[in-house]
Each structure stands twice: as structure tokens, then as C-alpha cells.
Amino acid sequence: MSPNETFLGMGGLAVTADSSQVLTTIGLGSCVGVALLDPRRHAVGLAHVIFPQAPSPEVDEPGKYADTAVATLLTALARLGSARSSLAAVLVGGARMFSFGRAIEFDFGATNVAAVEQALAAASIPISARATGGSIGRSLRVHAGDGVVSLREGRGDSELYRAPTGQRYLGATR
């Protein structure tokens, strides 16, 4: 962990345009980590979505719900100077962590992923990378300085996404 790392718990949401910052969330089972990246502004946002839809438009923790998390990330990134047309999304999580037997066939993870996809599509934000589904938990780190999204599955770490070379983040250090 670096001193410039911000950890988000379940339902957490954060944005930054500080190139030294890393946004991190762990324990993504059926939850979905939604990262939005703006390679022109080196701005990033991250939410740890637990549920597909908010009970009302006004909630205390907008990061908990797919619909309010995406809307809140977009608003916060716009305040940092990001344009929607510059954003790319990365999704992690949405696993099927619970089995209820044949009587109940409900996949919380798939429902969360579908809700995030719908919110992003409504906002015209493309999904550039994803590690969703399956039956294992994951963790996610978003590096603001160079637009790298790293993934931890099981015991292994890997780079899931990197900002395109032609759109290098300002102030990149890697």
C-alpha cells in the first residue's frame, strides 16, 4: 500500500485527478467495481457497486447502486474537467458467489453487471475492459497517473487495462 492509495469499502465512491493517487477496492464478489478513466485529464473514478438500482434518486451512498454510482461518477469527473466523450469504463466483479440450489436461480453478480452496463450505455460510455462473472472474488486498483487498472484474482495480479499509448495520461510516471 502506498501513502497515496485510497481504499473504498462496499458502496464507496471516489474520484481524483492527482496523478500520484491510486484508487483501490477489494472483495468484489457479486459486487461490481466500476472504474471510469479520462486519459486526457488523468482523472479517474471508482465505485464499489453492491445493488443494481437505488430505491430512490436521492440516496446517502450513491456508490452502492449501479444507477446512482455511474451518474455520480460522471458528475464528479465533469467537475474535474472530464468530458463524457473522453471516458472509458473498466468493470470488475459480478461473480456468482451464492448458490441457492435449483429452487432459486438468481445470479446477483450478473444482475449487477447488467445494471452497470445499462447505466454506462445510457451515458454513452464504452466499456474498454472487463473481468466479470465466474465464481471467484477479485480486487481492483486504478492508477491515476498512467491509467493502469490492475486486477487481483485469487493470488495473482495482472494488468487488465492501460490507457492507449496515443492518449497517455498527463504526468504519467510509468
Image (cartoon, helix red, strand yellow):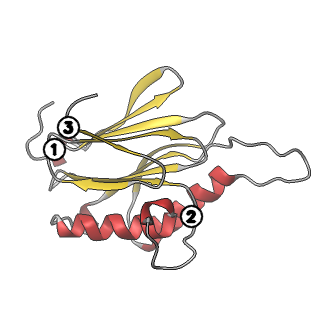
**Circle 1 SS class:** loop
Q: Which residue is mark 2?
A: 115
Pointer 3 or 1: first along the chain: 3
Q: Are marks 3 and 2 in contact (CB under 8 Å)?
A: no
Looking at the rendered structure, the kind of residue marked 3 is Asn
Looking at the rendered structure, the kind of residue marked 1 is Arg
Which is more foreground, mark 1 or mark 2?
A: 2
Q: Is residue 111 above or below residue 90?
A: below
Q: Which residue is mark 1?
A: 168
Pointer 3 or 2: first along the chain: 3
Residue that appears at 39% across and 59% down: 126
Which is more foreground, mark 3 or mark 1?
A: 3
Q: Is residue 11 above or below residue 67?
A: above
**Circle 3 SS class:** loop
Quadrant in which the C terminus is drawn: top left
Q: Is residue 152 above or below residue 126?
A: above
Pointer 1 or 2: first along the chain: 2
**Circle 2 SS class:** helix
How packed is label 2: few (under 14 Cα within 10 Å), some, or many (20 or more)? Answer: many
How packed is label 3: few (under 14 Cα within 10 Å), some, or many (20 or more)? Answer: few
Q: Residue furthest front?
A: 60
Q: Is residue 45 left or right of residue 93?
A: left
Task: Please tell me the numbered disc located at residue 148.
Answer: none
Q: Which residue is mark 3?
A: 4
The residues tagged by marks 3 and 2 sit, at their Cα atoms, a distance apart of 31 Å
